[in-house]
Amino acid sequence: MRFKSLIRLVDQSGVRGSSIEYRGELDGLRAIAITGVVLNHVGLLAQGGWGVDLFFLLSGYLITKILMEKTSQRGRLRVFYIRRFARLVPIAMIYLMYSVVVLTLQQKPIPGEALLSSIFYYRNFYELKAGPWDHYWSLSAEEQFYLLWPVALVFFARSSRLRSLQYISFGVFFSFLLLGQVLVISDPGINSIFQHVLVRPSILLAGCALAIFETRNTMSSKKRFAASSLVLGLILCILEFFSSTNIWTFGVLLIGASLLIDSERNGNLLKRMLRVRPLPQVGLLSYSIYIWHFECIRIAKILSSDDQVIMGATFFALLVLFSLVSFNFIEKPIQRFIVNRFSSPISKSK
């Protein structure tokens, strides 16, 4: 299959709404984020955890933008939850069932606690032990956030206090981030549950606050914010090479924030680079990749006989195959069916 034909297999129809303008650089950011996560999990990148943090920032921003675009429509929360469910939950449950079948065929014990916490989205409340569903901690944190944030946003929007919500969101985010750093410094062996339940999920609030900031401020203010965030983020990323502290996350989040706020069509060089194919296509596949990459690692290890080169090539081929099949033949059809079956007419125009 030629490269252009492969790219045509990845399009946004059926998985993306049109309630906000499509911006290819955001899918480019997703591609960078999922690359960091995957390289970290295969052992090629020590500092890949910022990939999940970048996903949180993007999710908070885009969800808030979508909800704010629909504030005047009746039933917007119902439509939002239907679309989120259709996009995220079915393939996550299918992967869980697949994993249970594989463990059963291999005659391996099924970790009941891990399975239940993944099914009901509270995986982040348990210690992670390199199991088949440990990556569900971030899905759990996001789903918990979806239960609370839309209601808060609608409440503050009705009372015309969105700017207050912006300050609250930034305040909670910085407080948890600072508290997390203080506790880690004072006790390096701090329980990771605190990080997974409060500290890292609070980055979703930073994305939400950015969306409100973008809506409530002038173009000149947004340009100044974007420029300063980009410069500071790049400086922090460069300093990481010369220091023993982990400041990758702060740098990456600031760069991401600058790209979210800088919504000009042409934009800077970094934005144009993020729109170059196949980055947006990889970004569109990022959820599929995230769901299946642990399974691809497992199969690649079995097939490679400890040869690292063969394992890498096998893993890459499996990841492309699994993500494309999942995206095109499972996720998109299921999402179309659920949205068309259960959404009101206003959601079908999204």
Image (spheres, helix red, strand yellow):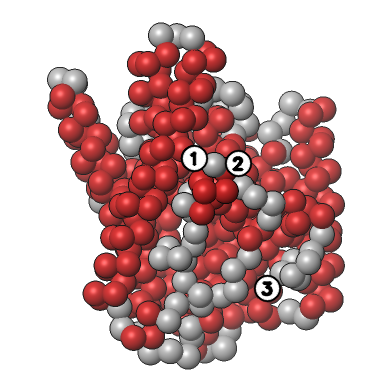
Q: Secondary structure at mark 3?
A: helix
- In the rendered image, which quarter is residue 99 located in? top left
Q: Nearer the viewer, mark 3 or mark 1?
A: 1
Which of the numbered marks, if any, corresponds to residue 50? 2
Q: Residue at x 68, y 74 (%)?
A: 214
Q: Amino acid at mark 1?
A: Met
Q: Residue at x 43, y 73 (%)?
A: 150
Nearest to the observer: residue 329 or residue 349:
329
- Give me the C-alpha separation between circle 2 and circle 3: 23 Å
Q: Earlier in the sequence, mark 2 or mark 3?
A: 2
Q: Is residue 298 left or right of residue 178?
A: left
Q: Secondary structure at mark 2?
A: helix
Q: Quadrant of the C terminus?
A: bottom left
Q: Residue 287: horizontal and vertical position, in percent?
A: 45, 49
* 10 vs 308: above or below: below
**Residue behind mark 1:** 1
* 92 vs 19: above or below: above
Q: Earlier in the sequence, mark 1 or mark 2?
A: 1
Farthest residue to the front: give it. 2
Q: Amino acid at mark 2?
A: Trp
Q: Residue 71: horizontal and vertical position, in percent?
A: 48, 85
